[in-house]
Amino acid sequence: MKPKQIYEKAKALFETYLTEQNFRHTPERYHVLSYCCEVGGLFSMDQIVALAAKDFISRNTVYNTVNLLQKAKIVHSLNKQYESSKKPMFEIAIGGNTHTQFVCTKCGRISEFKPQAIETVIMSRKYTNFVPEHFTLYVYGECKLCRRLIGKNNK
């Protein structure tokens, strides 16, 4: 799905959520949603804050909106538990956003790729009482850079 299509689907879900919760439909909230959709893949709060600053949207508004997007199940977070800063990363949770992520257990670096074979197996399989929409597969290990640093430290 293209970013514009993902945004339109996310916007419809967000409008429904805001209405059901009796929250205001502000332009700033929709701008933050559009930034999240534009980034594609993983994004940090800092990335969205930087994009929002161009439109004079405050850091608080970004944080509050991303929190609402999580509650609406439009965005989900990946806590980078292995990184020293422990800052979470986020991604859009709709629109067929299927991918695999390698998470380094030493530095927290995340690499993404879309293996067609895994997607084909997961999405084409028949499940009892379940219809898959999208998935994220996390593979934990050590990245090439950390393995190289460990090798240098052992010499």
Image (cartoon, helix red, strand yellow):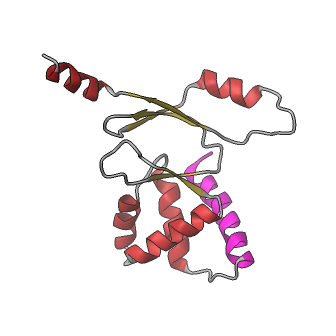
Question: Which span of residues is magenta-colored?
Answer: 1-20
Q: Nearer the viewer, residue 107 or 32?
A: 107
Residue that appears at 62% across and 83% down: 24
- Picture layout, residue 60 above or below residue 107: below
Quadrant housing residue 13:
bottom right
> Looking at the image, which residue is at 37% across and 78% down?
56
User: Total label count?
Assistant: 0
49 falls in the magenta region = no
x 41%, y 62%: residue = 48
Residue 45 x/y as whole percent? 40, 61
Chief secondary structure of the magenta portion: helix
Pick out the residue farthest to the top: 155
The relative height of residue 149 versus residue 92 in the rendered view (above or below) is above
Split into 4 quadrants, where in the image is the N terminus?
top right
Place of residue 65 in the rendered image (x, y in percent of width and height, measured from the top left): 52, 71
Figure quadrant of residue 152: top left
On the rendered structure, is 85 left or right of 65?
left
Please check the rendered image and state whether residue 12 is part of the magenta-colored stretch, yes or no: yes
Question: Residue 125 placed where, x, y %?
Answer: 78, 26
The residue shown at (27%, 23%) is 147
* For residue 117, above or below residue 133: above
Of residues 102 and 95, the one drawn nearer to the viewer in this rendering: 102
Quadrant assignment for the C terminus: top left
Residue occupying the far left of the picture: 155
Tell me where residue 92 appears, x and y as whole percent.
56, 52
- Which residue lies most toward the right here? 129
